[in-house]
Amino acid sequence: MSVKIEVKDVVKIFGDKPELAIKMLKEGHSKKEILKEIDQTVALQDISFEVEEGEIFILMGLSGSGKSTLIRCINSLVKPTSGSVSIDGKRIDVMDRKQLREIRGKKTAMVFQHFALYPNRTVLDNAAFGLELRGTPEDERYKKAEEALERVGLAGWKDRFPTELSGGMKQRVGLARALAVDPEILLMDEPFSALDPLIRNEMQEELLALQREMKKTIIFVTHDLDEGLRLGDRIAIMRDGRIEQIGDGRDIVTQPANEYVEHFVEKVNRTSVLSVEDVMITPRDVLREGESSWTAVKKMQRNDMNYIFVINKNNKLIGMLMLEDAMELVDENEKNIKKALKKPEILEPSASLEEASSKILSTGIGVAVVDEERHLIGEVSWKEIMEIMGGSR
């Protein structure tokens, strides 16, 4: 993949003495000291990262962390005091108004938290507004706007007005307006934070579905860690205008860079970011095809197991035997286990822990982990999941 957006050494100072503030930063003064001594606000401090084409990059942080200022720097709605912002290798922080209009018209589109719809315009007119500003002929812009509305599930609402829509529907119109101009980059500033949890969940699903189809480069601002983990390919955790850590969800949760990030992620549901491969263990024992019910009972009792996976000579999983069924066979003096074999739940190593948890809860026993050719390579039980959720692994 190629680099779509590059942010390099960006500093943003709000106030009338930015050069003095930067000098104080270089001398080691803190953000609080600079505000107290010269009344300058350090909004961003030494921000550097790259976003690859087609990536969903999350800017995550609490209020005041600088994430909204940063996304506005990326769109040049706010100019960095120092440093650079480039799109496709071209610095947008030094562009004039005409060049910026072209970038915003063709390359980028923004989706805001509070919808920003015009109440006296229909849904269709709102969706077509960006194209209207671009000077697109009426027939063409309405055609593209209708296509965008269809993508977000509002094809039958084009003649309605914003006052007739729910919050989730209004945000869909805002998303359709951004998609209608067919931007290469979507900048989304807490777009779902004003929605109730059920609608927010639907919009997250909608965005992921659209991304699978359209493969845009997306910078998504949120203060909701679960939302960031669900949507993002990578996440930047921000605090006081700085980036504390950049990584994928698994790295952020399992390898926090410092105490702040560790505290930030301590209550996250780890099953949403970890895979079966992260927690699976080697089966304590297995039963090989042809071994007797007596052997099965002995192996399970020796290892304190209430089930055992059965494999053939090629180590491929062929079934599972429960301890109580094996003991019944022994009582019947039946050595052959074939009639008592059960079909186990199976997962591949890349499956999510959420899926594993669901299977374990439904059956009450562990899940076999197999490769593409059904070789048994591990297992996951409720014990492993509880350990990872409690942070003990």
Image (cartoon, rainbow, N blue to C red):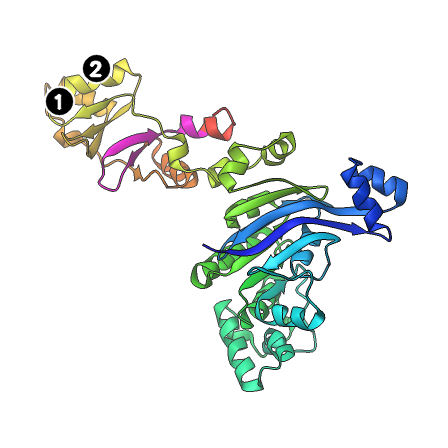
Where is 338 relative to 69, above or below? above
Where is 315 relative to 201, above or below? above
Residue 365 in view here? no
Q: Position of residue 84 (x, y in %)?
A: 66, 54
Q: Position of residue 158 (x, y in %)?
A: 56, 77
Indicate which disc residue 291 carries. 1
Counting other residues with Cα less than 10 Å from the Cα at mark 2, is it few (<14), some (14-19), or many (20 or more)?
some
Q: Which residue is mark 2?
A: 298
Residue type at the position of mark 1: Glu
Q: Nearer the viewer, residue 215 or 358?
A: 215
Q: Nearer the viewer, residue 148 or 324?
A: 148
Residue type at the position of mark 2: Lys
Q: Residue at x 21, y 15 (%)?
A: 298
Looking at the rendering, the stretch of residues picked out in magenta corresponds to 368-385
Tell me the distance, in whole angstroms, between the alpha carbons under discs 2 and 1: 11 Å
Q: Residue at x 29, y 16 (%)?
A: 303
Q: Earlier in the sequence, mark 2 or mark 1?
A: 1
Q: Position of residue 339 (x, y in %)?
A: 13, 31
